[in-house]
Amino acid sequence: MTTTVTVVECVVCGADVELDGTTLQGELIDCDDCGCELEVASVAPFTLREAPQEAEDWGQ
Amino acid sequence: MTTTVTVVECVVCGADVELDGTTLQGELIDCDDCGCELEVASVAPFTLREAPQEAEDWGQ
Amino acid sequence: MSDVRVAIVGGSGYTGGELVRLLLFHPHVQITQITSERFAGKLVAKAHPNLRGVTKLKFTSVAQLDACDVLFLCLPHGEAAKNWDRYAGLAPRVIDLSADFRLRDEAAYRFYYHNNHPRPDLLADFVYGIPELHREALRDARRVACAGCNATATILGLFPLYRAGVVLPQNTVVEVKVGSSEAGNRANEGSHHPERAGCLRSFSPTGHRHVAEINRELSVADKASVHFSATAIDMVRGAMATSHVFLNQSLTEKDIWKIYRDAYGNEPFVRIVKERDGLYRFPEPKLLAGTNYCDVGFEKDPSSDRVVVISAIDNLMKGSAGQAVQALNIMMGFEETTALAFPGLHPV
Amino acid sequence: MSDVRVAIVGGSGYTGGELVRLLLFHPHVQITQITSERFAGKLVAKAHPNLRGVTKLKFTSVAQLDACDVLFLCLPHGEAAKNWDRYAGLAPRVIDLSADFRLRDEAAYRFYYHNNHPRPDLLADFVYGIPELHREALRDARRVACAGCNATATILGLFPLYRAGVVLPQNTVVEVKVGSSEAGNRANEGSHHPERAGCLRSFSPTGHRHVAEINRELSVADKASVHFSATAIDMVRGAMATSHVFLNQSLTEKDIWKIYRDAYGNEPFVRIVKERDGLYRFPEPKLLAGTNYCDVGFEKDPSSDRVVVISAIDNLMKGSAGQAVQALNIMMGFEETTALAFPGLHPV
Amino acid sequence: MSDVRVAIVGGSGYTGGELVRLLLFHPHVQITQITSERFAGKLVAKAHPNLRGVTKLKFTSVAQLDACDVLFLCLPHGEAAKNWDRYAGLAPRVIDLSADFRLRDEAAYRFYYHNNHPRPDLLADFVYGIPELHREALRDARRVACAGCNATATILGLFPLYRAGVVLPQNTVVEVKVGSSEAGNRANEGSHHPERAGCLRSFSPTGHRHVAEINRELSVADKASVHFSATAIDMVRGAMATSHVFLNQSLTEKDIWKIYRDAYGNEPFVRIVKERDGLYRFPEPKLLAGTNYCDVGFEKDPSSDRVVVISAIDNLMKGSAGQAVQALNIMMGFEETTALAFPGLHPV
Amino acid sequence: MSDVRVAIVGGSGYTGGELVRLLLFHPHVQITQITSERFAGKLVAKAHPNLRGVTKLKFTSVAQLDACDVLFLCLPHGEAAKNWDRYAGLAPRVIDLSADFRLRDEAAYRFYYHNNHPRPDLLADFVYGIPELHREALRDARRVACAGCNATATILGLFPLYRAGVVLPQNTVVEVKVGSSEAGNRANEGSHHPERAGCLRSFSPTGHRHVAEINRELSVADKASVHFSATAIDMVRGAMATSHVFLNQSLTEKDIWKIYRDAYGNEPFVRIVKERDGLYRFPEPKLLAGTNYCDVGFEKDPSSDRVVVISAIDNLMKGSAGQAVQALNIMMGFEETTALAFPGLHPV
Ligand SMILES: NC(=O)c1ccc[n+]([C@@H]2O[C@H](COP(=O)([O-])OP(=O)(O)OC[C@H]3O[C@@H](n4cnc5c(N)ncnc54)[C@H](OP(=O)(O)O)[C@@H]3O)[C@@H](O)[C@H]2O)c1
Ligand SMILES: NC(=O)c1ccc[n+]([C@@H]2O[C@H](COP(=O)([O-])OP(=O)(O)OC[C@H]3O[C@@H](n4cnc5c(N)ncnc54)[C@H](OP(=O)(O)O)[C@@H]3O)[C@@H](O)[C@H]2O)c1
Ligand SMILES: NC(=O)c1ccc[n+]([C@@H]2O[C@H](COP(=O)([O-])OP(=O)(O)OC[C@H]3O[C@@H](n4cnc5c(N)ncnc54)[C@H](OP(=O)(O)O)[C@@H]3O)[C@@H](O)[C@H]2O)c1
Ligand SMILES: NC(=O)c1ccc[n+]([C@@H]2O[C@H](COP(=O)([O-])OP(=O)(O)OC[C@H]3O[C@@H](n4cnc5c(N)ncnc54)[C@H](OP(=O)(O)O)[C@@H]3O)[C@@H](O)[C@H]2O)c1
Ligand SMILES: [Zn+2]
Ligand SMILES: [Zn+2]
């Protein structure tokens, strides 16, 4: 079985993100380049948006 | 015995440097503010110049 | 003269502990209460083991606080403002070490703290706690907002040049290196030793909150706007700002010496540190641990109009508790250096 | 393919020792000789205790050097140029880790090194050793001048933005934090542990020598001129540059990502490190100890046109010995990552 | 030979991360799964930033584990025993890095771990993972219990003397100095950087749990019983034992050299480190970071019958993950040093 | 009461600098001269940058020394004895911080210092400077030999148990961990930061010179003989002894508490530090930097007759300069804690 892979651009860093037929709307996907969590906003066509993030402050 | 104190400006940092009747030409004097070694270039009138310095490299 | 009675709220924390250490040796002060919810009823030395054998005082809870002459607030961000009326009711004079009342401008607060200020009505009441800039106002102050630690180092480093009007006020780049005690005494993933040790963590390349107070204080001649970043290093105490300013006129190093000497020649706690040789040509925070000094040095770039200004403090002293005690001394008419004479150690 | 025979001059030093460590594990290299005058006749492991049980090689003196295929020079500043003819006579290929042949411009050399260059005739013969900028030239190079360690970190951090022409080329401020191994293995007052430990030493606020090579390499689109300072911290290995650049046009973080990905997407030893959360959002030199990576990250200041670029390396690896081995691999047609695969440790 | 398929349970922790680092470069191993509940679905490099660009593997949860050839367990104390049947069902060979199956004696377990052992039925099935003592048993082992890190350093330091029967077996005093990574990757008050940095914390003057395994392993000639204490220092990786043993007969240093050479002359990962001059006369853990060596040295007290034995390791390597990989190599018939060749850094 | 006039010989060194720091704040002391040959004529702050702005005193050379009331000698080993007559001629009271006059037994000196003592005639004249053991003798002393730093920590840790006669006097094992300032301010290969940083250097597993004074002082009930070793760690100030003693009778922890309380209950500078919980259950040298405390704690091994005693000091304070000032206070009849009140910092 082959699935068609669609390449979409990460909205944060512009990296290629691969989605396929099994991808669902609302699914969360990590961008491997910038590590951001992306939400599949729509599936036909595929669009991504940045997933809401909890604030975190380890910083200092 | 009182000696007359003459106040001269440090050539490096502008601090007041005190010289008196016992000061000799060629004498080396440290500026208390910037720590530089000053040479008494002349005594009448008093003038100072920066004493030649050995290069030093503790830096790193 | 009878002793001034002071209480310290948030005394189990790092700035609070430092205040206790200082005030225990203050000849005109009596500490009446020190609060901690976690340690209520326990010896103060339980939280601050350096004070073993030095004091038998115990923590109380905030709920048990009595009236006093001066109240010090050493609380996490937001707490002082939230419970202000309660605290203000306890003492005619309040010295707050938090960020709550440092700004005067609600919009700046909103921008940097991502929140509306809970008590904008109070912002005008506070004197900003850096004595070198606000000594006269501090004499009569009833409310003091101590400066941020990184802000203190940066402002004291740059103020003379900004006041003299000799720099491009919006071109300055400031890089602060800070120790781990800046973040207070609560453990978190980021403070876990195997991760935090040996680190060079760029925790705030842009957007640091202290920028608001820095820009306000440096806007003497013209509107100032600094480019700021902060990096955490493997150090517990200390903060050092390396600031790059650009002159708007031709100046020699001697000219700059004069500007700094004019500003700080009579200051008890600012030293100009700039030597040609030796190992300590410029300020070093390790020499300042436990002291109230801010050391300031500079170097003019011979091949450009840049001056690099280096300024260092102990964040828990001149950057918070020491600054607070200096403010107390000024407010109460004590000798300004009282309880702040410790000169620091070498080697260290 | 028979092994390449290499010799290392100055092998008892820090960069030399690192070269030995790497080349002992290089499958296509045979180390024929390693020099030290102090340790001549002694086991290499005497100077580099990490190599105990790993090699039985002994040091020889420079006087005993034989011909080889590639000669690495790991000598103090000035020595390579002074005895160039002797060294060049030994091998058709020479990789120099010192500063002697990095510049092409005699005047720049004179300005930064306070001396006339002893062999200006040779300056044009050397390829500058940063593969990300000069890979093609390195393939055919006979002489390589490896870059300075701070220069390497700075250039790799800034090159993509300068090449893209998106920054004001003369407004950049660079603050480098460095470890103590940068200064080599000779003890002096400044390296005495009680003084050097815990320090934040502003050893070069202005006038650092690496500025010459940085400006040369960044002058791609326009003449570049950076404002540089360097601070020594309590770290043995590692260098990190925090660079503040100012955009000449409006760019988003995504635009900047693309510029960096274009430059480094296929580079084996440059990683773009920029994360939204976690403890290691930006480059950290401690993670790079022993590795050949240069990690580069950035943050766009939302309230100005500033971009803060953070770039980190191990000064003894990507900043010298690792860079030299990468150059060797390129020159000899080996897989570029050979002997450079160690990924570094965590926690550390 | 097709690759061995291994999975790592608890792969987001410190020993698990080290295993991943090693096995990614193991030529005969394929990592099939790595678990973490916190990071399930995320890149392994998220937890172990040294592996950025080195692997694209992602964490899975324990619930998703599939069958494999060898399962490594890197779980907190108690977890392996509690869920043993689940884990044992996944692979014919299991290597456990925890303390759960190190002892064979239920009573000793109860004494040191203050609990009844949940699965005493399994205790006899495990081979203790120190190859220098149990190599033959490891060849056929199906279950391995890797030694404690402090136990590894102590046992390897003392075993030759105990086996030779030349010491008073119950008079030995052992002082271990340890780094902060020994306690794993969960932050707590004790690991908070401002408290943990610069510390010399006597966290276990008596009663350390590793004593049980140490005494068992050293009871070769006679029943051994050591006096043990452990002190935490400002170091991330590394453990060093300073052991004071008392001879029951007159021996020269040369005699003792022979005893150690007999024991370790052919060992790939134990080096006898004892030099008359230089800076590294005895073992130093900093030189061992990332390596699988245990360095052992000694000095005979000329004015008494005491011998001081110094033994050092990287707690995450020879003290856990490296030991586990060495055991794997032995079990699977691979060259014993495979994937363990990194020699460590100098300076560092 | 007019001020006591004191001079400090060897004032550019580490113990000398610490004495200057303390005595500048001593209300009954006037420092008349401070010697350094290297820095003669320069500001004292040139050698001790912590004293910038605190004193304008300058160094003189030894040749220029005038008479004074009390002379402090802070010279390298051997110098005080060699020039004794010159120094003794300057002041009726001499406090020597070196090892020259600590022993009373020529043979012990020869054994540990590998030399005949140059002035055995003087050995009986000195009072050993630990006040907790020799307070009465110090009151009338004219010559004081301050104890070695490691000796001070060890003796104060063990003395109560030895005096009480409850231990096997020849079975004790002592492990001392020390910082780099112990070796003074001269740089050498061993103090080079890249080598000394992060180290765990077993520099004296056996044969440490302080053993002679320790055994002498502990031989109260019976002839004592300790088994001693010393390890250098990455710390500047501080020494901590972990001592393992073996009881000759059955004692509970409460019994041991009583023995320590009897010995130190009224001592201003010895604290018993032993807590059940918290991060600082036992002594920690980092808390003692700059203070004159010796903190002593202990733990009884529930499964043997061993007691582990932990004792910590600042080597430059209680271990030398602070001890010297305490001796001065006793000799001169001042309040014993004068100028020694600094409580130390937390966090640090
Ligand atoms: N650390 C620095 O370098 C530094 C420098 C300048 C300014 N400051 C500012 O000073 C303030 C204190 O900082 P810190 O570092 O001392 O923090 P900290 O170590 O975290 O201490 C905070 C203290 O506040 C108490 N506390 C927390 N929540 C409270 C509440 N809701 N009500 C009453 N007490 C509460 C805590 O005590 P219990 O939990 O025991 O009750 C603790 O004593 C902060 O606003 C900080 O921004 C800090
Ligand atoms: N350290 C760094 O991070 C770094 C980074 C980039 C570039 N570099 C450059 O690399 C070069 C070496 O630096 P390093 O840190 O490795 O220095 P180092 O540790 O001081 O070592 C210098 C080596 O040169 C030998 N040597 C000294 N004088 C010599 C002479 N006249 N003839 C022959 N051999 C001589 C020394 O050996 P013996 O005394 O035993 O004979 C020693 O092996 C320098 O030019 C430095 O600028 C260093
Ligand atoms: N650190 C050392 O130096 C050292 C040396 C020798 C032996 N050991 C032993 O090795 C073991 C691991 O130590 P460590 O230092 O690696 O610990 P660690 O850093 O705390 O890691 C523990 C790991 O176990 C996972 N985990 C925790 N609870 C779990 C559960 N109930 N089910 C499944 N996974 C769980 C954690 O992952 P998530 O939370 O992400 O799921 C994490 O990956 C311990 O038994 C320790 O005693 C450690
Ligand atoms: N460091 C410690 O922790 C410690 C603790 C207890 C006891 N002690 C003992 O205290 C003594 C001093 O130790 P330190 O660590 O302070 O040493 P240091 O830092 O090396 O200082 C030695 C001082 O002696 C001066 N000096 C050297 N040779 C001299 C000579 N021939 N004549 C006159 N002055 C000379 C030096 O001054 P110039 O070179 O500038 O003239 C310097 O001021 C030693 O005997 C040491 O064993 C040290
Ligand atoms: Zn992305
Ligand atoms: Zn001057």
Image (spheres, coloured by chain):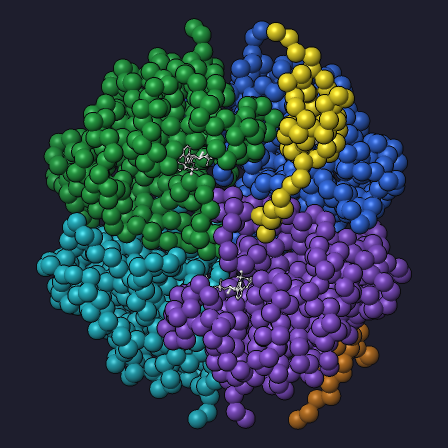
Chain colours: A orange, B yellow, C blue, D purple, E cyan, F green
Q: Quadrant of the N terminus of chain E?
A: bottom left
In this rendering, position of residue E253 left or right of residue C72 = left
Q: Residue at x 62, y 72 (%)?
A: D84
Residue D137 appearing in the image: yes
Q: Is residue E258 left or right of residue E9?
A: left
Residue A16 percent coordinates (x, y): 75, 77
Q: Is residue E279 above or below residue C121?
A: below
Q: Where does the image place residue D101, in percent across and percent down from the top left? A: 68, 68
Ligand 6 is in which quadrant of the figure? top right
Q: In the rendering, at what x and y percent does residue F67 appear? A: 41, 16
- Residue E292 in view (yes/no): no
Locate residue D321, reporting x and y percent: 57, 70
Q: Residue at x 78, y 30 (%)?
A: C259
Q: Is residue D143 above or below residue E111?
A: below
The tally of labels here is 0
In front here: D69 or E160?
A: D69
Q: Quadrant of residue D106?
A: bottom right
> In the figure, residue F224 lies in which quadrant?
top left
Q: Residue at x 48, y 18 (%)?
A: F32
Residue F91 lies, with reference to residue E93, above or below; the image says above
Give whichever of D346, D86 is nearer the camera: D86
Q: Looking at this view, is C4 or B31 the one in front?
A: B31
Q: Which residue is drawn at the image coordinates 76% and 43% (left, top)?
A: C300
